[in-house]
Amino acid sequence: MKTAAIRVFLAGSCLLSGSLLAQTYELEDIVITAGNSPIARSHSATPHSIINRAAIEASGDISIRKLLGQVPGLTVSSSGNSTTQIRMRGGEANHTLVMINGISAAAGDGEYNFSGISAQDVERIEIFRGPQTVFFGPSASSGVINIITRSHLEDRLETSAQLGQTNRLYAAKSLQLGQMTGVASLLSEQDRGYDYSFANGEKDGIKRQTVEIRSNLVTDNGIETALSFRRSDESYDIDDVNFGATSYRTYLTDSASSGDKDETLAAIQLAINADDQKTRHEIRLQQTKFVDVYNGTRRSNSDKSVLGYQLQRSFTAQPISESTFTGALILEKNADRNRMSPVEKRNGDAVGVEFRKTTDEQGHFQVGLRLDKSNKYKDATTWKFGYRQEVNAQTSLLVDIGSGVVNPTYFEIYGGWGVTGNPNLTPERNNSVSLGVEHTAPDSDSQFTAFVFSDRLKNEISTNWGTSTIYNESGTSTRKGFEAEFTAPLGTQFQFDGNYTYLIAKNPDGTRETRRPRHMVGANLHYDIWPQHNGSLSLKSKTVIGNYDQDFALTGYPTNRLPDYIAIDFVGRMDLAPQTQLVFEIGNLTNRRYYDVWGYNTVGRHVNLRLTSRW
């Protein structure tokens, strides 16, 4: 530990006088979460996708899980309306770190559940594929999803109302007091739900209320202060499992079971720029709390806290935002715990460095190294190397390689629900290689990005359902695949967007990993039918082929193939007035009955109507 720590610290100590809080920066008209230091999208080799505010406003269903379902490399698995997992590049759900404004969305040690959260108050969603532990710490082994909410409104007040499958009321007010600016928002949502037990029973819905305040203050002497507070209270209905099921249709039984979830995220950040913007110091404090109650019994009461310092430095005469050579040093203390158990707690320290360099030949380098020390596990060193070469003004070649780690969860260590835990588990470790190309057609808005990738996961943690025990797999789990996304205008009024994911995910013994489809295709045909009023029509489709899951109606729970499907949505929108927008959606247009998890039905054809006004 000491030797590795000294190497990392000495590499960073050359930074003469810089942000550990995952930030957003506007560079070259692109806002991007940069991890340790700011980066222009055109300089990054990391495979990523961005869902911006315009795409959110043009969507009918603005639930986060629906929006992420159209992103290459991501698999959305919903066990009913109240539980949704996101897997990235074939990794487990807890291998993807989910953040809201750079704050971990999950408290304690668990994964984040995307059940009721919507994008109503979201400015953009950034998805980074491949290991990001070197920037964001353990849990970012497969990648990162950063949900960035609105910190600025062009108008003083914005309101929105939606009726249909999801009823929603939203109000946001811009704040200004002297040099302090910000946004305060209130959001109330009710998903009417559906019966996902195949029993034609009662609908299982969700109610969620969210309040958020974000503020920023910049003083005359260059001191920046940022505050963020977000609280969500959610209640949900759920059906019960029938362990004596004889088919997927009888696996769930309609019931009146229910639960409640409370999520609280808070952060404060202080930053000082010095030396004509060539040096930046930042300190941040973050905390996440989560409480889950099922049928009146508390199941979880966990929290997570992070205290960090970062130093950024430009090694040229230009400020950090314009420099061709920058570095960053990070120091971090973190802790998580389950308040319901005195033994379920842990803490750690981290030190890391990052350097970025742009060459005269339009090559962009990114190198990072991080050391994590935990009171529960062996020290973990992770790294990242990225290189982007601009071949010409339209085409770039990209290389992204690195490593990531994921610590065992409390459930995996201590067990529960009839499963015996394993206190001797070793953290999972992922090594990844991505090779890509990005091309923009000359004199056109057509764009194309594609990556091939190969991930090798060691020490994968699995459950033996026959003995109800948890163990580290011997050997290596592999995830290989291809991701592509493109957009192409078809004349002056049509546009076609699409994405494709090919994935082969296997266990160390060569068997197929469940809930990782072989093929996923997303397509969107957009028609500007009434341009003078921003009037448009869109057909959106998602195709899933070759998905497998365990069959819990058969002895030994074998893996069987789920039905392939194509789901289609229709969306129309137009401006009723300069500051008023109407969006209309028919979801699951063909009323296709499909499912991504064995035994769980999905919602049929449904309608949403949303009206948004600004003052």
Image (cartoon, rainbow, N blue to C red):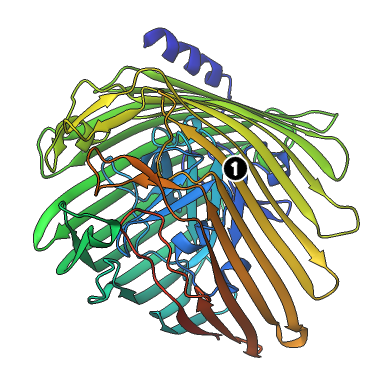
Residue at point 14%, 59% (across, down): 294
The residue depicted at 17 percent of the width and 50 percent of the height is 300
The residue positioned farthest toward the bottom in the image shown = 576
Q: In terms of image quadrants, where is residue 380?
A: top left
Q: Secondary structure at mark 1?
A: strand
Q: Which residue is mark 1?
A: 502
Q: Is residue 42 left or right of residue 264?
A: right
Q: Amino acid at mark 1?
A: Tyr
Residue 34 visible within the image: no
Q: Dividing the image into 4 quarters, which one contains the C terminus?
A: bottom right
For the point 86% across and 52% down, the residue is 441
The location of residue 322, given as percent across then percent down, is 73, 41
Dot 1 crowding, Cα within 10 Å, few <14, some 14–19, many 20+: many
In terms of depth relative to the viewer, which is nearer, 89 or 282?
89
- Nearest the viewer among 255 and 325 is 255
Image side of residue 528 versus residue 278, left or right:
right
Is residue 513 positioned above or below 179 on the image?
Answer: above
Image label count: 1
* Image position, residue 254 (x, y; %): 19, 69
Residue 297: tell me if it is visible: yes
User: Along the line of sight, which residue is nearer the eye, 607 or 306?
Assistant: 607
Above or below residue 535? Residue 601 is: above
- Name the residue nearer the viewer: 91 or 59: 91
The answer to whether residue 40 is left or right of residue 306 is right
Residue 306 in picture, x, y percent from top left? 34, 39
Question: Which image quarter is the N terminus in?
Answer: top left
